[in-house]
Amino acid sequence: MGIAVSLIFIMFYALSTLRIMPPGRRVRLLTKSEILKKLLLVCALAWGNVHAAGLPAEILSALKAAKLPGDSLSLAIVPLQSSQPALYFQGDKPSSPASTMKLVTTYAGLSLLGPAYQWTTEISSTVKPVNGILNGDLYIKGYGDPKLNLERFWLMLRDLKAAGVKEIRGDLVLDRSFFSVSDENTPYDDDGDEPYRPFLVSPDSLLSNLKSVRLTLRAEAGGVVTSLEPNLAAVHIDNRLSSSPAASCEAVKNKLQLAVDNQGSSAKIVLSGSMPTGCTGERYLALLDHPSYTASLFRSLWAEQGGVISGVNRAGLVPAEAQVLLTARSPDLANVIRDINKFSNNTMARQLYLSLGTGEAGKDSSAKSFAAVSHWLNSRGKQFDELKMENGSGLSRQEQISARHMAELLIDAWQSPYAAEFISSLPLVALDGTMKKRLGSMVGEAHIKTGTLRDVRAAAGYVRDVNGQTSVVVAMINHPQATAGLPVLDEILRFVHRRVAKP
């Protein structure tokens, strides 16, 4: 490589001494800055091409077709059941893993909390209900449940009525103190202009229904009917839509305009444009701030069940003398990590990550969680010096890990008592989750977690070869044109599936 660079330098030095004399133009010498720019460009291309020479021909061809340099890829392929040699390519390079970071979070969760772990939400009061009347405040305290969805929230309020409460004559007090998430106050910048998309919802110890609503549209002859689920009083719809003569419903998106004014304590959705008669549509939106959403959801569902509350909404801590009226429990962790990994749910991953640090000293939940993960790795004899975790979901510009260490973690998970729970949480190739529409020639032959960010495409998990033997695969592409890298990742997975040990 040193010889090649020297030859390139000599070539550019020679070019710099040539006089350029195009017809009708004055003689000019190349400047030093021009020489340097060209030298750096050629050296970078040469380095990428030479450095990629250690890759199998199929993967090299895929990189070339995608117009990606070799140094954009970090790769680890480690057989678990065969005599095949391990293959590492830039395996120690710290890389952004995107959502494959969820593998670290979910495996740490299984190990530290256990597959049967459940989150709780408590409803308490300092007084007991008498004849259905609670003559005092009602307290709701969350402990980080990532799956307190609409159905479970409704069931929790049904159980509250069964506990003897029909009318609340005090305030609704929300205790969100279990997590300290000062570092989570700055929202993730996804380079878009839609901060109300559900995948951007931040964590909260009293998270309810992923802070989201489902907006549905139905065009009828007399106009467009809209509805929200759940129907929150704090969210108003300004419907300016009109129905139009029947046409292709596929063109609906081009004729609809949606604007959101999200003030935190209230929100307004403005709809304008037209929609062909007979067409329908839906959109999921994350609106309000956490306490306003939970309070509005409580009041809406409580009223649907015939409940009454006369006080206001406010934040506060559950008094020491309060008595628990009921405790709602989440599905177990083994169930929750399936949602996190198969569908790459960022908010649920962040809830789990913050839950890992509750036993650590300190005030900041995210820092405590990273300390808990680091201690856990050290206890398993693993020193991942390059590891950086900001929120545990991969939705971050700071998180990083090497392909080698991610592979080590997957090997460790394969050998753990909870291997079945962990592996089954990953998307099955060509069958479900984020891999449902990929690699139809490998149906069910791999469990793969995907990762996608602006400059990142990644895949990590377990691949069975044609002899039924399994390998760990970790591939991360970090490059401004990483969007072109999906065929490269698919070719890597196909390569591992086809690869067989030589006799």
Image (tube, helix red, strand yellow):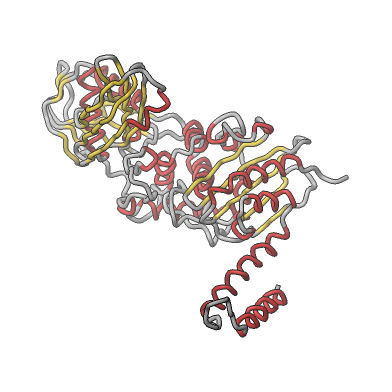
| Along the line of sight, the residue nearer the viewer: 276 or 353 | 276
| Along the line of sight, the residue nearer the viewer: 397 or 480 | 480
| Along the line of sight, the residue nearer the viewer: 37 or 264 | 37
Q: What is the residue that sits farthest to the front in this orientation?
A: 24
Q: Residue at x 35, y 35 (%)?
A: 210
| Along the line of sight, the residue nearer the viewer: 404 or 213 | 213
Q: Residue at x 72, y 44 (%)?
A: 495
User: In the image, is residue 493 above or below residue 140?
Assistant: below
x then y, percent, for residue 261: 22, 39
x then y, percent, for residue 236: 20, 30
Q: What is the residue that sits farthest to the bottom in this orientation?
A: 17
Q: Quadrant of the N terminus?
A: bottom right
Q: Quadrant of residue 461?
A: top right
x then y, percent, for residue 184: 33, 50
Q: Quadrant of residue 439?
A: top right
Count of number-bearing discs: 0
Q: Left or right: where does residue 66 sit relative to residue 387? A: right
Q: Left or right: where does residue 468 sit relative to residue 122? A: right
Q: Quadrant of the C terminus?
A: top right
x then y, percent, for residue 175: 24, 39
User: In the image, is residue 277 above or below residue 202?
Assistant: above
Q: Residue at x 75, y 42 (%)?
A: 81
Q: Left or right: where does residue 59 sit relative to residue 350? A: right
